[in-house]
Image (spheres, helix red, strand yellow):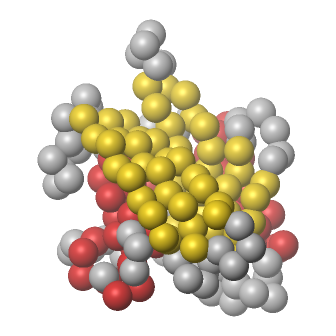
Amino acid sequence: MSHRFDGYLDTIGMPAPFRQRVSDICAFYETLLSERLPGGIEDVFVSEYVKEDGTREYESVWLFAGSYRMEAHGFTLKDNFDVAFCPAGTSYMRIEKESYDFSQAQPQSRMSVEVTFASPVDALRGRLRASGANCDHLRVVLAKHLVPGAHSLRGLEGEGASNSHARPSA
């Protein structure tokens, strides 16, 4: 993977070793699903939160491509990968936010989103968390990929949101 998500990772202040892990995870999923993802990974979201001592805890990496939802759990320490095909999208979403106006994140902004995917097999669930500037990226990901019926809400993500944090491949 050419560093097309570097702008986003810069925004959230991700350290170099974890950036490389994100790159490796994208490459893994693109290889695994190469027949099904001709356009590659569309968006990446790093689920993270700030602990009481002020340090940032990176939980997982979410990847979005077409009807696929992918998550690398505990990506800083291990390889633990999920893939879900969700052609019906999201059936339920719960948003909790603090010090965030859903417009411009502040350092103290926090957001947590729980989703249930409309899967033909099971009710698949996920949780995405964000702090500070990452709240703005989560808002974009919600609008593009997670809001129930998101495929019909393309205008919701706002100006420049079609992967506004990604840089084109060199």
Task: Tell me if 119 is positioned left or right of 162 in this view.
Answer: right
Q: Where is residue 117 in the image (x, y as percent from the top left)?
A: 57, 67
Residue lying at 78% horizontally and 54% vertically, measured from the top left: 81
130 vs 4, nearest the viewer: 130
Task: Tell me if 3 is positioned left or right of 49 in this view.
Answer: right
**Where 51 sits versus 90, above or below?**
above
Image quarter of residue 169: bottom right
Task: Let me know if residue 40 appears in the view.
Answer: yes
Residue lying at 17% horizontally and 54% vertically, measured from the top left: 103
Q: Where is residue 64 in the image (x, y as percent from the top left)?
A: 57, 70
130 vs 120, nearest the viewer: 120
Give the number of marks: 0
**Where 81 sits versus 148, above or below?**
above
Task: Let me know if residue 167 appears in the view.
Answer: no
166 vs 157, nearest the viewer: 157
**Where 46 sits versus 18, above or below?**
below
State which quarter of the image contains the N terminus. bottom right
Image quarter of residue 158: bottom left
Residue lying at 77% horizontally and 33% vertically, measured from the top left: 77
Q: Where is residue 94 in the image (x, y as percent from the top left)?
A: 39, 52
State which quarter of the image contains the C terminus. bottom right
Q: Position of residue 120 (x, y in %)?
A: 69, 79
112 vs 60, nearest the viewer: 112
Task: Tell me if 57 is positioned left or right of 105 in this view.
Answer: right
Residue lying at 65% horizontally and 61% vertically, measured from the top left: 124
Report the residue that reaches farthest toward the top.
53
